[in-house]
Image (spheres, helix red, strand yellow):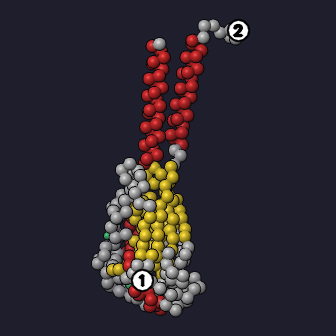
Amino acid sequence: MIQRSFLCSRTGAAAAAMFALCASAQAAVVDVTVTVQNLAPVNGISFAPLHVGFNNGSFDAFNLGGVATAPIISVAEGGAGGAWQAAFAAADPTATRGTIGGLLQPGASSNLTFRVDTALNPFFTFGAMVVPSNDFFIGNDSPTEYRLFDAAGNLNVATIGIKARDIWDAGSEVFDPAAAAFVGNNGLRSDQNSVVAFNFAEFAGFNGLATGAGYTFNSALTADSDVYRISFGVSAVPEPGSYALMAAGLMAVGFMARRRRVGTQPTDTTAR
Ligand SMILES: [Ca+2]
Ligand SMILES: [Ca+2]
């Protein structure tokens, strides 16, 4: 009787510990699939690859009304984003960063899955060049605008919808169809020396030009036009460590149960 209750409490404590460990691991780390969609009208704007970072909310790439600096210019002029990624890594070394897809034409979508620590990196920051343009981009001004995960690790934001009026002009390169990415010669660009502002009207200035993707551009945008959507899907991560711990716990429970069963048998007739 004493031995039985001892076994039960030990088994109960071990199980509780295992569940606590597994639960915390699942709450903190998840796989997040990010899907991006170009919702612009046919033959309208396309998007360069989307640069993203799951982060602690400390990296601020630009400000409305402020002079664009190298990180956001690397996104807005050409879309490569090298300086943006480097500055992000320097500001927030434990952020989970990446780049999704290639050139995203109207109607197209792409996705990529990231393993994210939701406690360490609850915020989401993004940036992509919009083409054709000299220096237009999409992105979040406030680094804490999109808190994807709450303290318990639950997904708070299912989608981020972007309209034409949300598109930024970096103010770093003069509007010039001859020098614009996707329709012109990038080598001809010249400095604008202005500030970051909202701007989608200039896209109409590219109407009728042949794009690098082969279609003839026609903006067809109004302020309310949906142009881009970012969607988030979360799935649990199987934790090898937790499984090993659980297996070890189950083996221990099985061993103790077997020992108890053997110990309660009056005689062992097969031993000899
Ligand atoms: Ca800002
Ligand atoms: Ca500009």
Q: Residue 219 location in percent, x, y? A: 48, 85
Residue labelled 1 has its Cβ within 8 Å of some atom of ligand 2: no
- Which is in the foreground here, disc 2 or disc 1? 1
Q: Are marks 2 and 1 in contact (CB under 8 Å)?
A: no
Q: Residue at x 58, y 16 (%)?
A: 261
Q: Residue at x 60, y 11 (%)?
A: 265
Mark 2, residues whose alpha carbon is within 10 Å: few (<14), some, or many (≥20)? few
Q: Residue furthest front?
A: 224
Q: Residue furthest left?
A: 65
Q: Residue 37 location in percent, x, y? A: 51, 71
Q: Is residue 205 left or right of residue 238?
A: left
Quadrant housing residue 102: bottom right
Q: Residue at x 33, y 62 (%)?
A: 144
Quadrant housing residue 126: bottom left
Alpha carbon of mark 2 to alpha carbon of mark 1: how far?
91 Å
Whether residue 167 is visible, yes or no, is no
Q: Residue 178 location in percent, x, y? A: 47, 92
Element carrying mark 2? loop
Q: Residue 232 location in percent, x, y? A: 47, 61
Amino acid type at mark 1: Thr
As drawn, 7 above or below 124: above
The quadrant of the picture occupied by the C terminus is top right
- Residue under numbered circle 2: 272
Depth check: give the residue in front, 251 or 98. 251
Amino acid type at mark 2: Arg
Sequence-wise, the earlier of marks 2 and 1 is 1
- Residue under numbered circle 1: 222
Mark 1, residues whose alpha carbon is within 10 Å: few (<14), some, or many (≥20)? few
The picture quadrant for ligand 1 comes to bottom left
> Which of the numbered marks, if any, corresponds to residue 20?
none
Element carrying mark 1? loop
